[in-house]
Structures are given as C-alpha cells and as structure tokens.
Amino acid sequence: MENKILMKGTDALGEAAIRAGCECYFGYPITPQNEVPEYMARRMGEENLVFLQGESEIASINMLLGAAASGKRAMTSSSSPGISLKQEGLSFMAAMELPALIVNIVRGGPGLGNIAPSQGDYFQATRGGGHGDYRIPVYAPATIQEVYDLTMEAFDVADIFRTPVMILGDGMLGQMVEPIDMHPKKDLEMPAKDYILDGAEGRPSRIMKSLILDVREMEEHNWKLKRKYDLMQQELPKHEEFMTEDAKLVIIAFGTAARIAKGAVKRARSEGLQVGLLRPITLWPFPVEAIEKLANKTSLFLVFEMNTGQMIEDVRLALNGRVECEFYGRPGGVVPAPQEVQRIIERYWLQKEL
Amino acid sequence: MSAQGKIIIDQSVCKACELCIWICPEGAIGISNVLNPKGYHPAEFIKEHCKGCTLCAVMCPEVAIEVYRGK
Amino acid sequence: MKKIYSRPKCLKDAIFHYCPGCGHSIIHRLVAELIDEMDLRGKIICIPPAGCAVLAYNYLDIDMCESAHGRGCAVATGFKRAQPDKLVLTYQGDGDMAAIGTAETIHAANRGERITSIFVNNAVYGMTGGQMAPTTILGQKTTTSPFGRREAFEGYPLMITDLIATMKGAAFVARNSLATPAKIKATKKSIKKAFEVQEAGLGYSLVEVLSPCPTNWKLSPIESFKYLEEIMEKEYPLKIFKDITKNKDSNI
C-alpha cells in the first residue's frame, strides 16, 4: 500500500518543489497563495536553502531570473495581480531561455478582484502574458496529487526546454487537502547547464541578454524560440478523458472546473445521458490532437470555465468548426455546484436532441 | 635630467574629446590634422616634454593611450 | 623605457560606442583594472543596466547578465543568494537606480545584500536622448524639463546615496567623481573598497560616480568635465558616507 500523506495544496506544491531540487524561492505575500511562501519559509530554512521575500512581485521575478542565471533550480509563486506584475520578468526569462517555475494561484479579477478561486487568467497564462512573441508551458492541476506531480514535472520541463514554466492553480486547490503519494522525483537525465554564469574562470566570458539590436538576429532568435515551442507542442500536451468512449456530449474543463464537471457528468450518467469530460492538463501547449480525435464521434462540446469564456477559443480553434461547441461560465470567484452544470448538460441534451 | 616619458596614442579609436590635451601639464599633446577612420582629428603626441605622468591615460575615455617612462 | 600604463587585460579590444568624453568607458576601465589586479575574472558577475551602459558586455570580458530597466539589484540579489561565493556587481544609471529601480535598490541595501552597485550619476537619461532624471539638478534643462527643472513641478534631485547611507544594511557608501585624474583614481579606490567589503560579506556596498554626459548636457567634453566639478559636485558633494571597516566619516 503506498504510504499516502494528507497534504494541503500549497504545502504539496512546496514540498514537491524542494524534492525536485528547487534551491531558491522568491515570493511576495498575496492571498490566496500566502501558504506557499509561508511553507517555503519554514521548509527552505530547514533545508538550508534560499528563501527570500522580495519587496514586490517585480523584485521577486527578477530575483528568480538572477538565481536561474546562476544555474540553480528556482521558483516563485503569486496570485493574479502579482502575476501581472511579473509579466515583464517572464518575458525576459523566456527571451533569455532561463528555466524556472512560476506558480499562479488564480483569484477573482480583473483589478483587485477578490480572493476566491477563478480561472480568469487563462489568456494571460497561455498567450505569453508579457510583451513579445513567446509562449510558456502552462500546467493546470485538478487534484493535490497532480499539484505534487506537475510541480516536479514542471522543473524537468523547464530544464529540458530551458524555459519558464507556469502552474495555474486557484485558491480552492491551494486550500484543499487530499491524501497523496509523495514519491521522489524521477531522475531523468537533464541537459548540461553549459550556459549558466559562474565566473569566466579559464573560459570565454558568457553573456545572458535579451537585447538584440540587429533585426535579422532578433528575427532568427524569434524563429529559434518558435521551433522550440513547436517541439513543445509535439511533446508536452497532456489531458485526461473521463467516460468519453460513448459520449455524445463532451464537457471540456480544466482544474477546479473539471472537478465540478466530473460531478455533473456522473449525475447526468446516472440519468442515462451519454456524457463525458475531456480535461486539459497542459493549457499550453493545448491538447489539440485529443480534441480532434474526439470530434469524430462527439455531437456537441460544452466548455465550462470559471471565467467568461477564454479556453473556449482554443477549443474552437482545435475543432475548426467541425463540431458545435457551447460555453457555460461562472466568473468572479463563484464556484458552482455540480448540479448546476448538470442542469446545463440536460438543457443542451434536450435542445440539441442528442 | 628628469625622467623622460613617452605615450603611444591609438589614433584609430580616438574621438577627439581633447581631454588628454586639456589635462597634460606639459602641453605635450595636440590635434593631428589627419582624419582617423571614424572621421575625427585624433590627438597627437607632439612634444618631447612628456614626463610619463599618465594623467592623459587616466583621463582618456577610449583607453587609447599607453604610457612609457624611464631612460 | 618601461610601459607603465596600458589597456587592462579584462577590457575587450572593442571600440566603445559611447559618445566622445563619456564617463562610462572610464568607469569600465577602472572596473577592468580592478578585475585584473584583484584577479576577479573567475568569480565576478556583472549586471549591466538598461541604459547607455547596457552594452558593457561588449567591453568587459567577464560573465554578464542583463536585467530589465531598474531591476539590477533584484537580479543581483537572486544571483548572490543562489551563489554566495561569487562577486556580484550591478552597474546602473541614475534612472535605473533611483527612478524605476528605487524600491529594488533601497531594499537590497536594507537587506544588506552582499552585492556592489556602481551608480553612474550623469543627471540625465542618456540612451533615450537626454530626458530628466531623478538626479537632474534644479534649473537644469533636459528634453523633458525644457524650462529647467522646477521644484514646484518636477520636485527635487533625489539623493539616493545619502538615503542608502542611513541604512544599517549598507556597509560601504561613497560618492566619487570623474572630474580630474586624481578623482578618477579616488573612484577606483572606492570601487576597490566596495569589492573588498562585499568579499568580506559585510553588507551592501554602493559607489556613486558623478559622470559627464557631453551630448545630453550640450557641452563639449572639456566643458562637461568642468561642469562636473563646478556644478554637479556642488549639488552632490563627494564623500565617503559610510565605511564600517573604519567607523568614522571621511571626506575624499
């Protein structure tokens, strides 16, 4: 029997990072992710690793950049407004191809919003977020075990592709407690960090920069990053399917929304409706292929998000008009009950005579 | 005979800021009437009064001056 | 004849892109000389600013990591915390350090980060074409204070070095100038002291260097160096504000 330990989302994330070899944490207080820096302050201290609360999120992301430039595995966490402040730093890290983990525990927005769980940062996370032509891998856990597993995976992906990686959670996932198996990290062979700065002892000096004044060189750098993103698009997409084998209607939802949708699917199934769920685990790169495959045998897709409709655009892009796709959303930090989503399923089921 | 000095000016990098001329206590540097690749009239070592005091080299923003001293 | 002065090894032999009479390249040379003399090339990391000196990595033959405008002290903090045995230097202009980067600078100093900052104060934003900086002097005309800086509208020159000198985390704080060869040598002495303070892990070290910007001051190089001594040094008196290795104030 695996020895499962009851862990809260924020703590599972912190512990996974430490066990993944994260040696530096920089952060700033913002609800609903405060327990991450609090956990890290204690645990990083116990492990004699670097914990530093910056004077702002802007300072924290730039400290992260400095630590990444020195070759150490490093992370930061924040919540929506804080992640907005970190976008400039993220763009720099993407341009300089520096690996790091950035955690966004999304809260109600826009503006000061509130501290309730939301998925309103989907666009910001999956469209690069900062200035310039870049993307970053984004993972959306839906269970505490996934928070643990994906945190570890994120560090590997960051080092393999030399890129910042984001984990997109929300306040609910952060506070939720579930038993998890805290397995050690996979020891994959990581590419050598021959690009880091450690003092030009007996070697030519190295420059880490994103200023590229010559436009042709900048173009080539953009295409280089694009080739990397295409590679990620091939290798990284991850999703889960639930009861989609014979489903006529498939809900697409991620994170906490997917948990709610799963409850709705079970209820609808008990009423005899052939309904299923496709849950993207990587929001970027988006699991296009999985959706295309399902499109051959699905009559209707229903996208359910805790926002006013963002991932729906990626779903429509993936479907390319081949199958109808409806949307149901509850923004602002509202966490609807499964029954509510079940009623929406039944309504479409009748309207579309599935 | 007081110590003698000599300077070598890398005229290709000189931007004619004339700081060395202004600072030289012996007036041992002037302006060349030849143009360098950048289109400046570079500084020119014109007199043998140089004492090798290195003030010109310390002042030069282009690090263009080497100083020699001794017999 | 013996060669007694020449280009430091640590300076790449690229031609500086700086304007004639600019102080940046003089400071680069001082840093390069110190790196040679103190044998720092194997352990020093420099964080250039977003500003005229962003291209410092074309000249200093050491490991360099660019930072976004104003974030030098934060990048340096992250690096130094991750690799405490390295010598970390931020090289920043007045806008970088005392406008957009004020918080990063003040808090790095306040935490006593074991990093060194060289703060080049030329009272304007050079690279972007001579706009008003936090250190622009009252009455000084710039492209964004065309009538001369007026306290009623643009407030007062920001004495960030004086502020940092009051902080317990700061171990060595000095203000120097490039106005004369003697003062250039004193600048080198201050930077060397700052490196030593960092190596001894005593806290944050800051050297402000008053530096000319002929192009944006609209003065000749020689006039700029006179302006530096007659005007800038009056507004920003040269001083070793703090040196915890010798616990007394001393003027240069």
Image (cartoon, grey):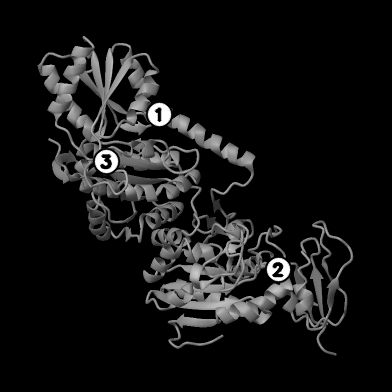
Do tags 3 and 2 sit on the same chain? Answer: no
Quarter location, residue C144: bottom right
Q: Is residue A266 left or right of residue B2?
A: left
Q: Position of residue A30 (x, y in %)?
A: 27, 53
Q: CA distance from mark 3 to mark 2?
A: 54 Å
> What is the chain letter for disc 2?
C
Do tags 1 and 2 sit on the same chain? Answer: no
Disc nearer the start of the sequence (1/3): 3
Whether residue C104 is visible, yes or no, is: yes
Q: CA distance from mark 1 to mark 2?
A: 54 Å
In the picture of the structure, the residue carrying the numbered disc 2 is C21
Which mark, by number, is residue A235? 1
Q: Nearer the viewer, residue A182 or C168?
A: C168
Three-letter residue code for mark 2: Gly
The secondary element bearing badge 1 is classed as helix
Q: Position of residue A31 (x, y in %)?
A: 24, 51
The secondary element bearing badge 2 is classed as loop
Quarter location, residue B44: bottom right
Q: Mark 1 or mark 3, which is nearer to you?
A: 3
Whether residue C43 is visible, yes or no, is: no
Q: Position of residue A109 (x, y in %)?
A: 29, 43
Q: Nearer the viewer, residue A69 or A317?
A: A317
The secondary element bearing badge 3 is classed as strand
Q: Say if C65 sits above or below C121 in the image.
A: above
In the picture of the structure, the residue carrying the numbered disc 3 is A169
Q: Mark 1 or mark 2, which is nearer to you?
A: 2
Do tags 1 and 3 sit on the same chain? Answer: yes
